Amino acid sequence: MSILNEWNFWSKSIDIGTRRDAYLDRIIALEKTEQVIAITGARRSGKSTILLQYAKSLMDKGVGSENILYVNLEEPRFFSSLSLEFLQEIYEAYKEYMEPEGMPYVMLDEVQNVPGWERFARALHEKKEAHVMVSGSASKLLSREVGTVLTGRSVNLTIYPLGFDEFLRFRGVIIKSRMDVIREKARIRKNLSEFIENGGFPLAVLKEGKREILRAYFEDIISRDVVARFNVTKTDKLKAIANHYLTNVSSPVTFNSIKKFLGIPLDTVERFSYFLEYSQLLFFVKKFSHSLKEQEVNPRKVYCIDTGLRNAVCFRTSEDTGKLYENAVFLKLLKGNYEMYYWKGKKECDFVVKDGAELKAIQVCYDVEKAREREVDGLMDAMNGLDLFEGLVVTGEYEGEERIDGRTVRFVPLWRFLLDYK
């Protein structure tokens, strides 16, 4: 109880940082399902802080601090005791000392460290004894795994590094209206450069030594979320593949091309690529096709969880800006839960986005003056192939709207896309 007291609001206030309201609103909505809420995401993306922020929001609405139990299962003093029985002991001690009223909120952070944790969570839920929330890193607590161990008793929320709107809020730039956008436009554009360069991992945004922090995150993901999770012994080959992907973000890749370039067996490339995707360090986007077979046999485009992490690990060149802009667009779409593909017909288009039953074509062109014709041609090829009458080009600076061959092409600068696109 002495250790738990250090992590809870029972006798003191706790610094919960800058509120991430979109995630808190989502948790409030998920709470109405009366299921176990599983919070997952890449390591260091802010899961623990959001749990504490939600605890504080409950208290702000009148829930007593004694009715909230937060357990950090990465607390070093717990390591020698972690077990199903230990979870039960923690809960019994909490009830005895804090005497919660009604159904308390039980938040188990980094729950994957406890073998058999799902039985404890399931028992509390089935007996309607507590509101249960669990969190864990992406590689060990993916939604499909939670769904298996909790057999339909859970709902999932994925936490990502800061989006650009959150990044601005962390920097003290508050955007609530169009007038705010007009007034703060210069600061918005200045912050965009830093966002693209250093990314959105919360600690890296707030602290100095950003590159060192981000390199440490990369090593942590590789060692803890891939090597330890999948018992990888060829760590040099794993890092070589990871670095190759990070260097080539926003580019089409094939396992065979990596095999030839790095001299690594094909099955090793395939397995390690899967592991890296599983850890949420990387994501792969397939070519748009109504044929599943064609989707599988064509190259996939690769993207990274954070542009700052990518820049910290790889050598940065001036030519990378367009790739990083495209990666930023991908992450915005990912957080919107859109189904994504790329287009490859006679020309190429960066994204075909499925929004419900509607398809949208999006092209990313950092320098419109240099690459306008090629990029617009690619967008028009996708629009013609998909029978779309409107398309979008995300740019560095240019903004406008044009009619081309009877179709509407909108040009929107990246900063506006990241703030406005729904």
Image (spheres, rainbow, N blue to C red):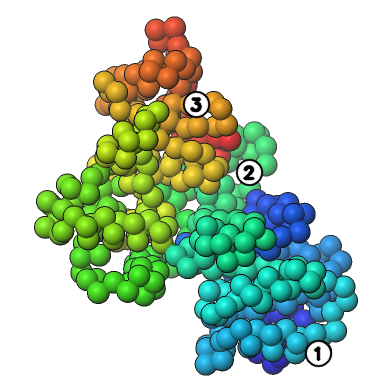
SS state under label 1 = helix
Q: Identify the mark at residue 313; answer none if there is no mark.
A: none
Tag 2 or tag 1, which sits nearer the N-term?
1
Residue drawn at the location 61% of the way across and 56% of the way down: 156
Residue drawn at the location 87% of the way across and 73% of the way down: 102
Q: Place residue 348 in its image quadrant.
A: top left
Compare residues 233 and 64 and report the one nearer the observer. Answer: 233
Above or below residue 66? Residue 274 is: above
List x then y, in percent, for residue 135.
59, 68
Label 1 and label 3: CA atoms lie apart by 56 Å
Q: Which amino acid lies under the numbered mark 2 shown in the image of this protein?
A: Ile
Is the C-beta separation of discs 1 and 3 under 8 Å? no
List x then y, in percent, for residue 196.
40, 49
Q: Dot 3, how many residues are within 10 Å of its Cα: few (below 14), some (14-19), or many (20+)? A: some
Label 3 and label 2: CA atoms lie apart by 29 Å
Horizontally, is 410 left or right of 29 in the view? left
Return the residue at label 2. 175
Above or below residue 64? Residue 357 is: above
Q: Place residue 69 in its image quadrant.
A: bottom right
List x then y, in percent, for residue 213.
40, 69
Return the residue at label 1. 97
Residue 137 in sight in this render: yes
Q: Quadrant of the C terminus?
A: top right
Residue 40 in sight in this render: no
Compare residues 161 and 343 and report the one nearer the observer. Answer: 343
Tag 2 or tag 3, which sits nearer the N-term?
2
Q: Which amino acid lies under the numbered mark 3 shown in the image of this protein?
A: Leu
Q: Identify the mark at residue 359; answer none if there is no mark.
A: 3
Q: Which amino acid lies under the numbered mark 1 shown in the image of this protein?
A: Tyr
Residue drawn at the location 23% of the way across and 45% of the way down: 254
SS state under label 3 = strand
